Image: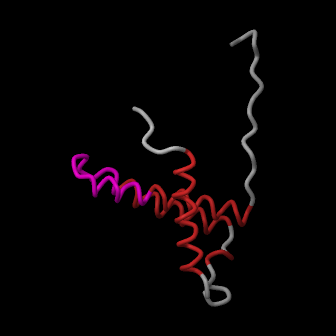
């Protein structure tokens, strides 16, 4: 399958979701601001929306474009929740293993 979106477009979609989240959370009462959550709370949010993503993905009719968009909206939401969790709790880089030219 060929790519439909560039990585730049994907990150732009994630940024648009993060902007939506920030606007929605702006003005939350102290102690009720989702950005103050511990990592385990973010994991539960991510898990909850992942369940909704799986349900949507398992029930969509591949012939109806609007349903594909609905599923991709959940993909964007889950991705953005992962982003905000890392924003507030750290974003460790993936360490790339060194390739062994002898065994490759």
Q: Quadrant of the C terminus?
A: top right
Q: Could you tell me what secondary structure mostly forms the magenta stretch?
A: helix
Residue in the foreground of this view, choosing between 49 and 14 = 14
Farthest-out residue, bottom: 29
Q: Position of residue 80 (x, y in %)?
A: 56, 61
Farthest-out residue, top: 102
Residue depicted at x 54% and y 79%: 24
Could you tell me how many numbered marks the image carries? 0
Residue depicted at x 55% and y 59%: 14
Horizontally, is 103 left or right of 1 in the view?
A: right
Q: Quadrant of the N terminus?
A: top left
Q: Position of residue 31 (x, y in %)?
A: 67, 86
Residue depicted at x 73% and y 63%: 89
49 above or below 1? below
Image colouring: secondary structure
Residue depicted at x 31% and y 50%: 58
Tell me where residue 70 sits by quadrant.
Answer: bottom left
Q: Is residue 5 magenta?
A: no
Horizontally, is 85 left or right of 63 in the view?
A: right
Magenta-drawn segment: 56-74
Q: Position of residue 88 (x, y in %)?
A: 71, 66
78 above or below 99? below
Tell me where residue 30 sits by quadrant.
Answer: bottom right
Q: Is residue 69 magenta?
A: yes
Q: Position of residue 71 (x, y in %)?
A: 37, 55
């Amino acid at each position: 399958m060929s790519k439909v979106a560039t990585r730049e477009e994907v990150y732009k979609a994630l940024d648009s979701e993060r902007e939506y989240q920030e606007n929605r959370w702006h003005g939350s009462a102290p102690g009720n601001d989702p950005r103050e959550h511990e990592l385990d709370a973010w994991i539960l949010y991510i898990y909850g929306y992942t369940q909704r993503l799986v349900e949507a993905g398992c029930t969509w009719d591949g012939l109806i474009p609007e349903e594909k968009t609905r599923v991709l909206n959940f993909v964007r939401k889950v991705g953005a929740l992962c982003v905000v969790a890392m924003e507030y709790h750290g974003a460790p880089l993936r360490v790339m293993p060194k390739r062994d030219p002898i065994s490759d």
